[in-house]
Image (tube, rainbow, N blue to C red):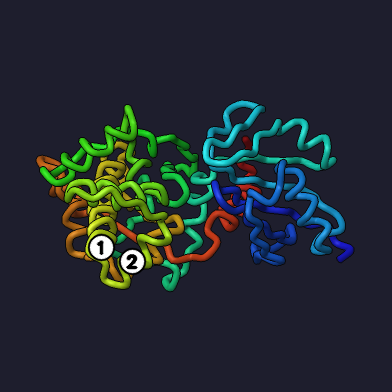
Amino acid sequence: MSKSVNIVADIGGTNARFAYVHSDSSELLGIEIFPCADFTFLIDALNAYIERGHVEQVDQICLAVAGPVESDWIDLPNNHWAFSRAELQESLATHVTVINDFSAQVLSIDGLTSSELKWIGAARPHGDQVKAVVGPGTGLGVSAMMPSGHILPSEAGHIAFAPTSDHEADLLKILWQRYDRVSIERVLSGMGLANLYWANCVLDGHDRELPASGVTAGAFAGDEYCGKAVSDFCAILGSVAGDVALMMGATDGVFISGGILPRLISLLDEQTFRQRFESKGRFSEICSEIPLGLVLSEHPGLSGCVEALRKGVRC
């Protein structure tokens, strides 16, 4: 191609997703997914994408990364990559914008089609209030967008896990054997599924381990402890989504993104999920009126990067 393009990338803990767009379009082209473990440095992955032949001339690059982006040096907590934005920009000889991956997620919300959203409950957005995204994947991301369009990035995935039942309190006691502090990311992520499986097994006197993929497969196959882990995961996620609605003032909706829940959608008890979202004591009535949506879009982070470039969002 002779026309310069913008490259967008969604850098998670496990995979890096790349695409390019023309400056006058939001259509994602040349989508590639690279395992982060295949590259020593982020710039190696970027160069590999460029060398695939998708791109000849790059105008701008927007990276959505799973970690804090407030300083020039960016060290990803769930990934071995670390880099200086200024050095990356100099090496690539093009402008580089870096945003938090969940800033990208929340930027994508307004562009989702009806087929890319599944609503849980009857409430729908009004369009003029705060909205938030909660996303369990390799880690747990949380972000919010103000009515003005300004993004409030956060590391709310690292707040403490707060049980809401005797069973969850028992899980927490087991998990304290593994972690001095149990954050919600320790239960609402890929490792979270594995932790919940292990904790449920230990509660019944068994010391068994499975990776997240094994827990998911076991739940579909009818395994008792895998099923318990998935049930706990979904229930706790419902509660945390309601907590995020309150802490962010997200009365225009909480949207569940990330790679895990769409795979479990046939196992999701929607009534329990909504009930846990709304069960907030004196604020239950308020939460009952807040929209709760499940994002089904395949690449919301990439779409959010495109929107960031369109709006001129900077690091």
| Quarter occupied by residue 152 | top left
Do the residues under discs 1 and 2 have CB atoms within 8 angstroms? Answer: yes
Q: Earlier in the sequence, mark 1 or mark 2?
A: 2
Q: CA distance from mark 1 to mark 2?
A: 7 Å
* Few, some or many residues within 10 Å of mark 2 (<14, 14–19, 20+): some
The residue tagged with tag 2: helix, strand or loop? helix
**Residue type marked 1:** Gly
Assess disc 1: are there few (<14), some (14-19) or many (≥20) residues with their C-alpha within 10 Å of its C-alpha. many
Residue underneath mark 1: 227
Between residues 292 and 170, which one lies in front from this camera angle?
170
Quadrant (top left/top right/bottom left/bottom right) for the C terminus: top right
Q: Quadrant of residue 280?
A: top left
Is label 1 in a helix, a strand or a loop?
helix
Is residue 135 shown to the viewer in this render? no
Residue, x 41% and y 43% (percent of image)? 142
Residue 122's x, y, as percent?
A: 23, 65
Single out the residue that lies furthest toward the right. Answer: 2
Q: Residue at x 72, y 41 (%)?
A: 41
Q: Is residue 194 above or below residue 73?
A: below
Pointer 2: what residue? 218
Three-letter code, disc 2? Gly
